[in-house]
Image (spheres, rainbow, N blue to C red):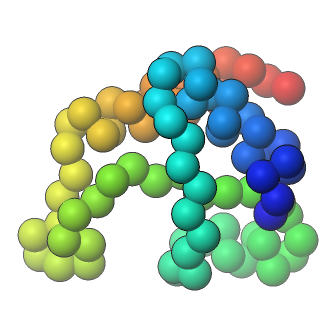
């Protein structure tokens, strides 16, 4: 995906509206979207900060969840 593709620009716009700096990180993790991408779908996976990933102590903060919610809400409210 290019940063000029619609999913990226919608994410960027939503972040700007809520005052959060957009960050794009390419990963090769096991998200379900990998299957859709193999079929040609363009998109991205939204994620919040995680700590001690894939351990019994994995966690995130309420603030990170809240910020993710603000971004998702903005994306949903702009139906393009």
Q: Quadrant of the N terminus?
A: bottom right
Q: Residue furthest right?
A: 40
Front residue of this view, candidates 7 and 20:
20
Give the left or right position of residue 34, taking residue 79 as reference: left
Front residue of this view, candidates 60 and 56:
60
Q: Quadrant of the C terminus?
A: top right
| Residue 76 percent across, percent down from the top left | 65, 26
Q: Is residue 74 above or below residue 48?
A: above
Q: Is residue 80 above or below residue 58?
A: above
Q: Is residue 58 above or below residue 77?
A: below
Give the left or right position of residue 49, taking residue 20 as reference: left
Give the total number of marks visible in the rendering. 0
Residue shown at 33% from the left, 53% from the top: 49
| Residue 24 percent across, percent down from the top left | 59, 55
Residue shown at 85% from the left, 48% from the top: 4
Q: Is residue 52 above or below residue 23?
A: below
Front residue of this view, candidates 21 and 72:
21
Residue shown at 38% from the left, 32% from the top: 67
| Residue 48 percent across, percent down from the top left | 39, 50
Q: Residue furthest front?
A: 21
């Amino acid at each position: 995906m290019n940063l000029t593709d619609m999913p990226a620009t919608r994410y960027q716009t939503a972040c700007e509206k809520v005052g959060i700096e957009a960050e794009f990180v390419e990963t090769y993790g096991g998200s379900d979207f990998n299957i859709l991408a193999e079929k040609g779908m363009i998109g991205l996976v939204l994620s919040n900060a995680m700590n001690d990933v894939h351990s019994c102590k994995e966690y995130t903060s309420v603030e990170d969840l809240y910020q993710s919610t603000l971004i998702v809400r903005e994306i949903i409210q702009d139906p393009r």
